[in-house]
């Protein structure tokens, strides 16, 4: 008699696939390493003895059988997540959970007061905020609503453009008290410029003064956007910041706005099916209004 593998085995398989080791998967799942090994072994037996991983110096490498199994296991994980969220949402329409996804800077600097207002209007709704600069897969229901800096292409997604977010060079007043502000882009070579260590995807095609952006341009490097903003606020140097965020403090001064600005179209997105879920639609509509207001005041200063 064939025994169907337990869902836990597939969840463990995905964790090992994602982390590349039994120990890391065990930490992620709050299990012991032997338990993770038993789950993988039991799944291999249930699948007819097919090996799912091979060992290498860099960790566990998925076999062809594992890669073929991956999309099916991910579909099961997405379905399980939906069941958990739906089950937690309570009996009434405006009770339960709404999961929201946004980039680090939007989620940390822009959304908190917006979500506070939503929570005050809908006290029965629990809010889950997922922060990542990678777009989550709304088709797999990794989130209910997302704020994105790129237009969604999938037909099953429902989206509203809320405006543009603009970024430019800024420095704290304390830094400018110690260093004369740059008059031209070329002057940045005489300043501490805050930036990244690894070039992010959006920056690979950017040019500043006709030159590509590389890590060598930065004297202070951090691949976390919030870390860069913290360095900017501490007066360490000159960095790129959203104009809307900079205006809130009053201590971050925009620089070189005629020479360099960067902007992204901003969208609020959800799955078409979620339009029927009252609490999710309420969050979507609330974000559209609030993010439209933010984008309207987040442009570069007028000369």
Image: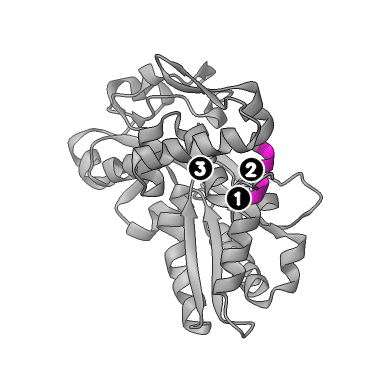
Examine the rendering and report whether any part of residue 261 can be seen: no
Mark 2, residue position: 73
Does the magenta-highlighted stretch encompass residue 73? yes
Q: Quadrant of the N terminus?
A: top right
- Whether 144 is drawn above or below 102: the answer is below
Label ID, residue 125: none
The local secondary structure at tag 3 comes to loop
Q: Report if the CB atoms under discs 1 and 2 are less than 8 Å apart.
A: yes
How packed mark 1 is, by other alpha carbons closer than 10 Å (few <14, some 14-19, many 20 or more), is many
Q: Nearer the viewer, mark 3 or mark 2?
A: 2
Residue nearest the viewer, comparing 19 with 92: 19
Q: SS at mark 2?
A: helix
Residue pushed farthest front? 1
Q: In this view, does 194 lie to the left or right of 275?
A: left
Q: Earlier in the sequence, mark 3 or mark 2?
A: 2
**How far apart are the alpha carbons under marks 1 and 2?**
6 Å
Which mark is on residue 133? 3
Give above or below for 182 relative to 11. above
Q: Quick one: SS at disc 1?
A: helix
Which residue is located at x 70 percent, y 73 percent? 277
Q: Which residue is at a point 47% across and 60% down the rendered structure image?
A: 129
29 left or right of 211? left
The answer to whether residue 208 is magenta is no
Q: In this view, does 264 lie to the left or right of 30?
A: right
Q: Which residue is drawn at 49% across and 50% down?
A: 301
Is 295 located above or below residue 261 in the figure?
A: below
Q: Mark 1 points at which residue?
A: 77
Residue stretch rendered in magenta on the structure:
71-77
Q: State whether the magenta stretch is mostly helix, strand or loop.
A: helix
Marks 3 and 2 sit apart, C-alpha to C-alpha, by 24 Å
């Amino acid at each position: 008699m064939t025994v169907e593998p337990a869902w836990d085995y597939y969840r463990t398989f995905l964790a090992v696939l994602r982390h590349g080791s039994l120990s890391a998967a065990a930490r992620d799942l709050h299990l012991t390493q032997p338990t993770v090994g038993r789950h993988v072994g039991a799944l291999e037996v249930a699948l007819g003895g097919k090996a799912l991983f091979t060992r290498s110096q860099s960790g566990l490498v998925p076999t062809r059988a594992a890669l073929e199994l991956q999309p099916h296991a991910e579909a099961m994980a997405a379905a399980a997540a939906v069941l958990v969220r739906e089950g937690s949402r309570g009996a009434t329409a405006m009770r339960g959970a709404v999961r929201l996804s946004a980039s680090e800077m939007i989620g940390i600097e822009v959304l908190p007061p917006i979500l506070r207002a939503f929570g005050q209007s809908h006290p029965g709704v629990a809010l889950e905020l997922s922060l990542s600069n990678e777009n989550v897969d709304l088709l797999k229901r990794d989130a209910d609503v997302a704020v994105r800096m790129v237009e969604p292409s999938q037909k099953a997604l429902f989206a509203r453009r809320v405006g543009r977010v603009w970024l430019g060079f800024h420095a704290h007043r304390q830094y400018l008290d110690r260093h004369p502000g740059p008059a031209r882009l070329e002057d940045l070579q005489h300043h501490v410029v805050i930036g990244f260590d690894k070039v992010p995807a959006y920056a690979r095609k950017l040019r500043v003064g006709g030159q590509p952006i590389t890590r060598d341009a930065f004297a202070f490097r951090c691949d976390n956007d919030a870390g860069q903003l913290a360095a900017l606020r501490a007066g360490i140097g000159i960095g790129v910041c959203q104009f809307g965020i900079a205006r809130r403090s009053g201590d971050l001064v925009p620089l070189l706005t005629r020479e360099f600005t960067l902007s992204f179209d901003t969208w609020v997105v959800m799955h078409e099916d979620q339009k029927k879920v009252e609490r999710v639609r309420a969050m979507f509509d609330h974000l559209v209004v609030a993010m439209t207001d933010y984008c309207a005041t987040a442009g570069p200063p007028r000369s």
